[in-house]
Amino acid sequence: MIRLLVADDQAVVRAGLAVILGAEDDVEVVGQAADGAEAVRLTRELRPDVVCMDIRMPGTDGIAATRAITADPSLDVGVLVLTTFDVDDDVFAALEAGAAGFLLKGADEATLLGAVRSVAAGQGTLDQRLTRRILREFTDRRAAPARPSAAAPGVDLTARELDVLRLLAEGLSNTEIAARLFVEPTTVKYHLTGLMQKTHARDRLQVVLWGLRAGLVDVTGGG
């Protein structure tokens, strides 16, 4: 059962998300928060698996709340950021803060449910149509990537882990990566788990961002 917390300053939106997501057999909505501060407090109190977090809320916004949640070593929570905007500064700030992914509020029910389940499984989520665009802009907004040896001291990736990392940056699913590498999806999952352990990342998206910072991922090409 996925324990879910919904955080949004609009009561109607909170209620709507709670009804849609809570209707699933594998999802239990354990709480609702009207702002970021309440989201952090309820996360520590209720220990959800996933927080659906609105970015723009009064007082403590979703970015600050996400940072507080992901920085707490006692919490094992995936934050799924919901926004009415496509790609803007707030989205990048949320990813930097440790969000497991982001989704537009206009996403259909199936996409929303799929994103929650993906984040709960530790895989994170990012709209594949926007992945390379987002990662390119993420790279452009940062200083030039450091050399891998400087950015990731002590992290030694295998050749296959590096293959998986680079395909993750294309927004491919485990099944798609497996097809590309001619291996089983379980093998991809094994290497992804190794990447997460070595990079201390909570999910696949944060693994990719680590790769960008380390200079191991190139997203300057087409797509």
Image: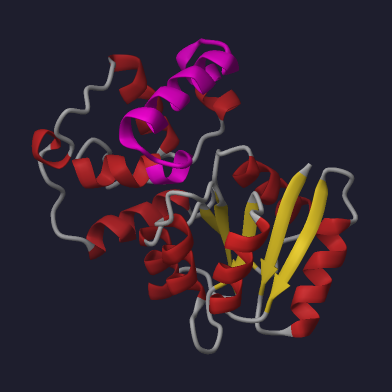
Q: Kindly tell me whether residue 157 is visible in this rendering.
A: yes
Task: State which region is magenta.
Answer: 178-206
Question: On the picture, is 116 further left or further right than 39?
Answer: right
* Quadrant for the N terminus in the image: top right
Give the image location of residue 169, x and y in percent. 40, 40
Question: On the picture, is 56 further left or further right than 154?
Answer: right
Magenta stretch, main secondary structure class: helix
Question: On the picture, is 168 further left or further right than 157?
Answer: right
Instruction: State the residue lying farthest toward the bottom.
Output: 58
Identity of the residue drawn at 81% across and 66% down: 18
Q: Nearer the viewer, residue 109 or 196?
A: 196
Identity of the residue drawn at 78% across and 67% down: 17
Identity of the residue drawn at 74% across and 46% down: 2
Identity of the residue drawn at 63% across and 62% down: 45
Give the vertical position of 16 relative to 196 (above or below): below
Instruction: Please tell me in which quadrant of the rendered image residue 67 appears.
Output: bottom left
Give the image location of residue 56, x and y in percent. 53, 81
Give the vertical position of 35 relative to 7 (above or below): below
Give the image location of residue 49, x and y in percent. 64, 49
Q: Kindly tell me whether residue 88 is visible in this rendering.
A: no
Instruction: Please tell me in which quadrant of the rendered image residue 70 appears.
Output: bottom left
Question: On the picture, is 157 further left or further right than 121?
Answer: left
Instruction: Please tell me in which quadrant of the rendered image residue 216 appears.
Output: top left
Count numbered badges in the picture: 0
65 magenta-colored: no
